[in-house]
Amino acid sequence: MMTVKEIPRLRGQVAEWRGAGERIGFVPTMGNLHQGHMQLVRHARSAAQRVVVSVFVNPMQFGPGEDFNSYPRTLEQDRDKLADESVDLLFAPGIEEIYPHGARHTTRVEVPQVSEGLCADFRPGHFAGVATVVARLFNLVQPDVAVFGEKDFQQLAVIGRMVEDLGWPIEIAAVATVREPDGLAMSSRNQYLTAEERQRAPLLYRTLCEVAARLRSGESCFAELESDALQTLRSAGFEPEYVAIRDALTLQSPAGMDTPQVVLAAARLGRTRLIDNVQV
């Protein structure tokens, strides 16, 4: 596996593969890789002859008081895991490589509608940071297919809309959330949980599954379902930011019961922010 930090080397290698007619798969990450990331890599391998993975902790998607400085950086271990999956190229740039004029002075990409509400209400500017860095990485790697996890459902919607609106010839592949045996969605931030919090954390997923089951049974009072879920989480010691039932395609409030729906939630448990969703 090749490890590259400089953009010219990345572009040169990608151009060589493209010139040979090889299909390129791409998995952007912030590192501290776990089995959820490896599932994305395996999907990319099944969809392309060459696989590029980026590891870049993006300062633009962290707000004031968030964990940018303490976010786990484990590049050596990440490199070993990616090599075991036969990744062709690891792109691990520094901040100055991605934002040569500084993150505050870079051109920004914003995606309306799907980037509003939900997590955006609690992380202002987050999705502009996500869209900006992914747009930059897409332009550098020029993948045929890019792979993302469904755990970050709103992020997936933002990226899909950005690609559609800008007319990029990139297939966005969504991979189902990878979970621990007790249902907790795998996340790099799970390591912030204390042992006692880790025992409680799977309740978030179970609560969303209960809402989804009630929807499937025909209940249609969304406000009541959301309120019951919020109360369940608060009673268990979570600090929920939201539980929301949305149209799975637009992330707007559902117009009725006939469209695909998704139940989304974000909640804090101690110092850990957990997100999850269940599609209906």
Image (tube, grey):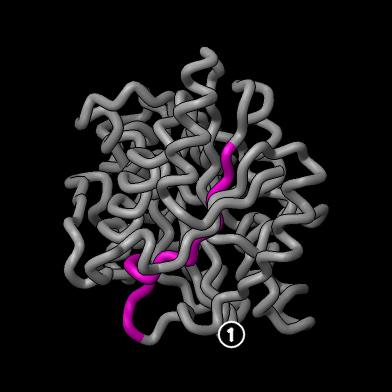
List x then y, in percent, for residue 17.
Answer: 54, 24
Identify which residue, 37 or 169, lies in the foreground. Answer: 169
Identify which residue, 131 or 88, lies in the foreground. Answer: 88
* Residue drawn at (63%, 65%) of the image: 188
Q: Quadrant of the N terminus?
A: top right
- Relative side of 23 to 161, left or right: right
Residue 58 part of the magenta-drawn span? yes
* Residue drawn at (72%, 65%) of the image: 76
| Residue 81 visible (yes or no) | yes
* Residue drawn at (66%, 37%) of the image: 88
- Relative side of 242 to 236, left or right: left
Amino acid at circle 1: Gly
**Residue 69 vertical placement versus 142 (above, below):** below
List x then y, in percent, for residue 97.
Answer: 38, 61
* Dot 1 alpha-carbon crowd within 10 angstroms: few under 14, some 14 to 19, many 20 or more: few
What range of the chain is rendered magenta? 52-64
* Residue drawn at (65%, 64%) of the image: 32
| Residue 280 visible (yes or no) | no
Indicate the secondary structure of the residue bearing disc 1.
loop
The residue wearing badge 1 is 270
- Relative side of 3 to 246, left or right: right
